[in-house]
Image: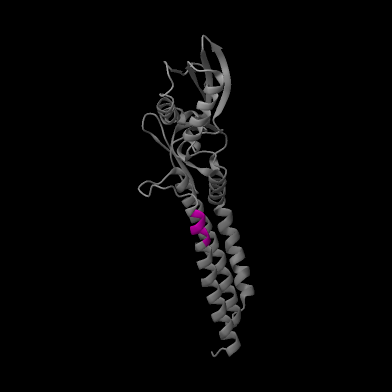
Amino acid sequence: MSLPLASLIKILVTIGCGVVAAFLLRLVLKKFRARFEDEDPRTVSELERRAETMVRGFRIIGDIIVTTVVVVIVLKEIGIEIGPIIATMGIIGFAVGFGAQSLIKDLLSGFFLIIEDQIRIGDVVTIGKATGKVERITIKTTRLRGKDGELYIIPNGDIGQVVNYSRRISQLVIEITAPVDPERMLGEIGGVIKKIYNDEVKKRLTDPIHVSGIKSYRGGKATVDIILTSRLRDRDRVVGLVLPVLKKELKDIDGEISFQIPDGFVL
């Protein structure tokens, strides 16, 4: 069977457009993926894993759409009636779809679970009757590791209410007292905060660092509260990043400086 030149050209152009579309899709997804990469190539962060899962899902969906469009156009140009094929595929698709409802439900639920950032790898959560640490999140399933080492593999479509214990907010107060006048105290603290508030600290805080102002001024000593708000799981790391810098930068103040973390500031 010989094809008219016009049909042959249309087929080649269609295939070429399909290849270009697939290439552009991968290029866009690659740039999207790059936005979530951190500066350490030796490790893969949880955010990078989520981005990779999303990219993989979008790539599969995009490839299916592009391939389907190209095949339909090519078959039509070859002279094959696509009406009966579409009708047959519709029946098969209905049968498969009816049998694969749970799979589709899992995929859609997994997609929104990732997009909405409901849970992250490392979070301690309760899903249904299962409580454990999130080890892996895919489009289809979520894996939890229980306290006794048991592994829960939960289809995403079965996930209803989620209790995330790792999203509790910690409001940490560092109380600083120094033998200086209030104006100098605020000036010193303001300068130190600018040095503290780097990218590493920013990504672990849920709100900007807050300075309460002069809490008290007695006996020539001014007291200021610095308030750091973070997720509970990041609290110790935030203290480890902030407190040493405070002590280092304020050591030149004459007299004894005290740093205290009062109890009862975990919300």
Q: Nearer the viewer, residue 200 or 24?
A: 200
User: Which residue corresponds to the image point at 57% horizontal and 84% vertical from the top-left?
Assistant: 9
Find residue 135 and report its image quarter: top left
Q: Nearer the viewer, residue 47 or 218?
A: 218
Q: Is residue 75 above or below residue 170?
A: below
Colour scheme of the rendered structure: one colour
- Residue numbers of the magenta segment: 28-33
Q: Residue furthest top?
A: 219
**Residue 32 within the segment the image draws in magenta:** yes
Instruction: Tally the numbered discs.
Output: 0
Q: Is residue 170 visible?
A: no
Q: Is residue 235 visible?
A: yes
**Residue 196 within the segment the image draws in magenta:** no
Q: Is residue 102 above or below residue 74?
A: above
Quadrant containing the N terminus is bottom right
The x, y position of residue 89, in whole percent, is 59, 66
Q: Nearer the viewer, residue 204 or 147?
A: 204
The x, y position of residue 234, in whole percent, is 46, 31
Find residue 149 and report its image quarter: top left
The x, y position of residue 188, in whole percent, is 50, 26
User: Which residue corresponds to the image point at 55% horizontal and 62% vertical from the top-left?
Assistant: 62
Q: Main secondary structure of the magenta part?
A: helix
The x, y position of residue 94, in whole percent, is 60, 59
User: Which residue corresponds to the image point at 49% horizontal and 28% vertical from the top-left?
Assistant: 232
